[in-house]
Amino acid sequence: MNPQARTTLTVLVTTLLSLSVYSQTTCSSPTIAPAACSGGNGAATNGVNINGGNTYWFSAGPSTFSSLNLSGGTLRICGNLTVTSMNINSGTIIIEQGGIFSISGSFNVGNLTIINRGTLNINGSLTLQGTASTIYNDLSTSYLSITGNLVVNNASGIINRGIFAINGSLTLQGSGNNLCLQDNAIFNVGTFTNDVTNSITYAGNGASACFSVSGSATLNNALTASNKISVCKSSSAPSTGWGAAIVTNGCTSCATILALTINDLTAARRGDNIMLQWTTRGAIHEGDIFYVERSMDGSNFEVLASVTARDDQSIYTATDNTLAAPKQYYRIRTVTSAGNKVYSIIALANTGLTEEQPFSVYPNPINPNGKLYIRLTDVSAGRTTGITTGAMAHLSLLDATGRTVGMQDNALSQGDNVLSWRLPNLHPGVYFLRVVYPGGNPRYSPVTIL
């Protein structure tokens, strides 16, 4: 290979590698993983200087400091802290999920990393200049607000997976893609100036993100090359210059143009209940209904409860007061105004009940008015007591909401027992048989009525 060709190839490979690295870093997750607020140099206090090599944390609150100085170190927030006068030269700020951090001041800063997994409120303006800085609004539930203006210079960038709101102006300038949006992310600004070609990139899995401008916009370069960016713009903003974005004119809210999604469903045992929580993003309307569905096998679901949506609410909860199986599965379902069904992911709750039930139920499924047989196994092996003649077994049948729809008491004989129960005329669906008898705690088994 001649020297000129070798030089050309080297430049090409170097260029491709640099583009690959840039693409991976501008839309990737932060390298600092979630962690507890502990260790390091201890809890942050009013007026503390957080210098390079220092790590301070805050987990109490709500509390207010009059001052705090970040000069190259790391501050991790797990509680609720307000700083009325903060000085930032460089360093790392991490707000963990559930944490709330509110700071006041106007900041011109370089070499700053912000990782927001909770709520961050900046009461002032922020300019990212000098050494590149990165802001991660890291979770779909993360919320970051700036009351003033945001200027993003040079190779600094923002990765937004949640809601990012700027009351003042946003200016994107310098080099490189400044803003990366992922599935259903929302970025709201008052006024907007774009000086970078394709300053907004998309790195999601197919669900659009929304960029909203409530005031005027100056578009000196095309905004984006992705049609997965939806622009919600006021009538005063220009109609051209948005690149490949899908533009809605006279738009007042991203919620009107984003497809509805149900995110972050969790299900966890709290005492004798299963607590569920989920968040919504996109076109939800006042009065829409969320149906909470439960399954014992992760496949066949029945409606457990319904929750009414509000147009000013994005976080919802529900409670299941029945522990019926070692593992219980949940999902959320709603129907859009267009008639489309929208489902959440399936969440698994471990109830803590034993996998081995000392009784069996048959036939199952069973026809309405059918006779149900319950075999109780004597679990007295290795114990001083077991099933004895004259002991009582208490049977109850619960519907999907936990309401008792039938009860029966049976006298037992020593050893194993087989009981029969002529069920009342019930609607088809999944019910739960609750059995209490000597030898253990209450036991449950699902019963399907055909």
Image (cartoon, rainbow, N blue to C red):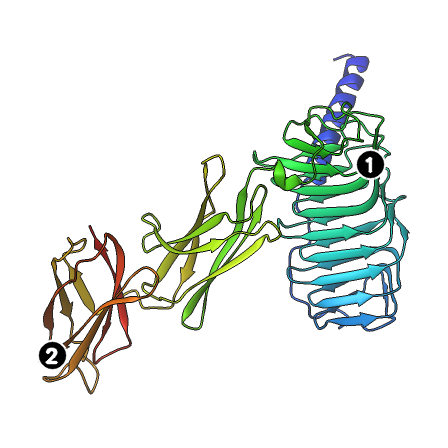
Q: Amino acid at mark 1?
A: Phe
Q: Tell me which corner region of the image, top left, top right, bottom left or bottom right, holds residue 120.
A: bottom right
Q: Position of residue 293 (x, y in %)?
A: 39, 53
> Is residue 161 found left or right of 68 in the rendered image?
left
Q: Nearer the viewer, residue 36 or 181?
A: 181
Give me the C-alpha separation between circle 2 and circle 1.
Answer: 78 Å
Q: What residue lies at 87% left-to-right and 44% top-to-bottom?
A: 131
Q: Position of residue 87 (x, y in %)?
A: 89, 60
Q: Are marks 2 and 1 in contact (CB under 8 Å)?
A: no
Question: Which residue lies under the disc numbered 2?
Answer: 412
Tell me if mark 1 has few (under 14), some (14-19) or many (20+) residues whose alpha carbon lies within 10 angstroms of its own. Answer: many
Q: Position of residue 68 (x, y in %)?
A: 86, 66
Residue 59: in sight, yes or no?
yes
Question: Which residue lies under the disc numbered 1?
Answer: 192
Q: Position of residue 184 (x, y in %)?
A: 61, 41
Q: Amino acid at mark 2?
A: Leu
Q: Nearer the viewer, residue 440 or 407?
A: 407
Which image quarter is the N terminus in? top right
Earlier residue among tags 2 and 1: 1
Q: What residue lies at 59% left-to-right and 42% top-to-bottom?
A: 282
Element type at mark 1: strand
Q: What residue lies at 82% left-to-right and 60% top-to-bottom?
A: 103
Task: Identify the disc placed on residue 243.
Answer: none
Element type at mark 2: loop
Q: Is residue 44 above or below residue 341?
A: below
Q: Is residue 424 above or below residue 197?
A: below
